[in-house]
């Protein structure tokens, strides 16, 4: 399907961008990331204009990068400020600089026409950098196209089968979903609210809630990149208060950034922010370990699917049912963005 361009993508976690030179390919474009002495993230095309040597394999000199092959020197705006053996710098000696914004602890990069970049269009995930919340997170490389991860995340009925014993219980697959699409804002909402159900170990061992629970899974997908799962776990029968105050429940904001690396590989950024057991490092370690295990179960399955797709004839027809409503809506919005 190609990539949705003129869009913001999560390129890295804030803490990944620092004094070093971080190479990351986003939507097929090799990019080098670093942070200036003043603390601002920089994103430049990762190819020297001279003979293509990766700037990420080069060295920093203050806020500049000196190419590791013959010494072309670049400023943070991509302009070449020195070349070896001559004073005159060719007018075309510059590498593209990408618009980059750090927000909610995420480093976003704009893929497309830099003149069209609008920071206000970046969807928010405020819990990641908010008092009263603690986050664990990681990133797994996925050898599969991003469309497969979007499908996967928009249909959580697979938790029952692929993630049994972690976050899956029989009720997830049994409970119908409601799907809404805000076409104008370009957001897909999928909601599954389970009453009086078994508590999966992921939440039983982290929240301390004993016995049966009410479990809400409210998905909000902002194509192309940001996926939010608002998860509410409460002792069964406990409803939120009138002003949305909800002290007896535990909340987890599960955030994914789905960033295409190439047509058939994806950066699978996963985050779990929680408003309970804030000071309990054991809970942090447990959630990080459990969520990573769950993500790797998805990665393994999707890597298999990518191979299946690679070997199949053109025009293979899938079969879709009710659980796929959210995924199909997401595909429609993505197609609109790619012009496909
Ligand atoms: S390739 Fe960078 S200076 Fe020659
Ligand atoms: Fe999954």
Image (cartoon, rainbow, N blue to C red):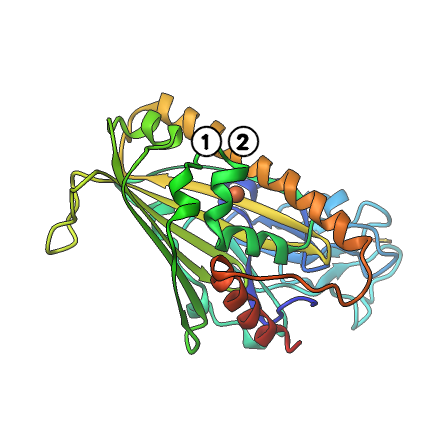
Residue drawn at x 38%, y 55% is 176
Residues 71 and 138: in front is 138
Task: Identify the image quadrant of residue 139.
Answer: top right
Q: Callout 2: 10 Å neighbours few (<14), some, many (20+)?
A: some
The tally of labels here is 2
Residue at the far top in the pictured view: 282
From mark 2 to mark 1, how far is it between C-alphas? 9 Å
Q: Is residue 240 above or below residue 134?
A: below
Is residue 21 visible in this depiction of the protein? Answer: no
Side of 151 relative to 169 (left or right) = right
Task: Identify the image quadrant of residue 233.
Answer: top left
Q: Tell me where residue 220 appears, x and y as whole percent.
A: 40, 59
For disc 1, the marked residue is: 166
Considering the image in quadrants, where does the C terminus appear?
Answer: bottom right
Considering the image in quadrants, where does the N terminus appear?
Answer: bottom right
Residues 147 and 2: in front is 147
């Amino acid at each position: 399907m190609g990539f949705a361009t003129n869009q913001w993508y999560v390129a890295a976690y804030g803490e990944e961008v620092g004094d070093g030179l971080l190479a990351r390919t986003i939507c097929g474009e090799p990019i080098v990331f670093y942070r200036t002495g003043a603390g601002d993230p920089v994103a430049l095309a990762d190819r020297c204009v001279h003979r293509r040597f990766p700037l990420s394999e080069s060295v920093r000199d203050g806020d500049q990068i000196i190419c590791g092959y013959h010494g072309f020197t670049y400023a943070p705006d991509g302009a070449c400020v020195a070349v070896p053996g001559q004073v005159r710098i060719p007018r075309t000696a510059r590498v593209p600089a990408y618009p980059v914004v750090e927000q909610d602890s995420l480093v976003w990069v704009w893929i497309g026409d830099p003149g069209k970049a609008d920071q206000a269009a970046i969807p928010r995930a405020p819990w990641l950098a908010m008092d009263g919340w603690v986050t664990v997170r990681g990133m797994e490389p996925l050898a599969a196209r991003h469309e497969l991860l979007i499908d996967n995340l928009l249909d959580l009925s697979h938790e029952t089968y692929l993630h049994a014993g972690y976050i899956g219980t029989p009720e997830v697959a049994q409970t119908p979903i409601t799907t809404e699409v805000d076409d104008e804002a370009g957001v897909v909402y999928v909601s599954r609210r389970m009453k009086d159900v078994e508590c999966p170990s992921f939440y039983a061992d982290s929240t301390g809630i004993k016995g049966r629970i009410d479990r809400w899974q409210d998905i909000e997908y902002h194509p192309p990149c940001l996926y939010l799962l608002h998860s509410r776990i409460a002792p069964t029968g406990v409803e939120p208060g009138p002003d949305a105050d909800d002290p007896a429940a535990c909340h987890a904001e599960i955030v994914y950034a789905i960033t295409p690396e190439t047509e058939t590989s994806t950066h699978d950024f996963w985050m779990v922010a929680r408003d309970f057991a804030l000071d309990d490092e054991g809970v942090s370690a447990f959630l990080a370990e459990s969520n990573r295990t769950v993500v790797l179960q998805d990665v393994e399955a999707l890597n298999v699917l990518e191979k299946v797709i690679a070997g199949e004839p053109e025009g293979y027809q899938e079969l879709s049912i009710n659980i796929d409503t959210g995924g199909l809506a997401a595909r429609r919005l993505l197609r609109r963005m790619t012009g496909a």
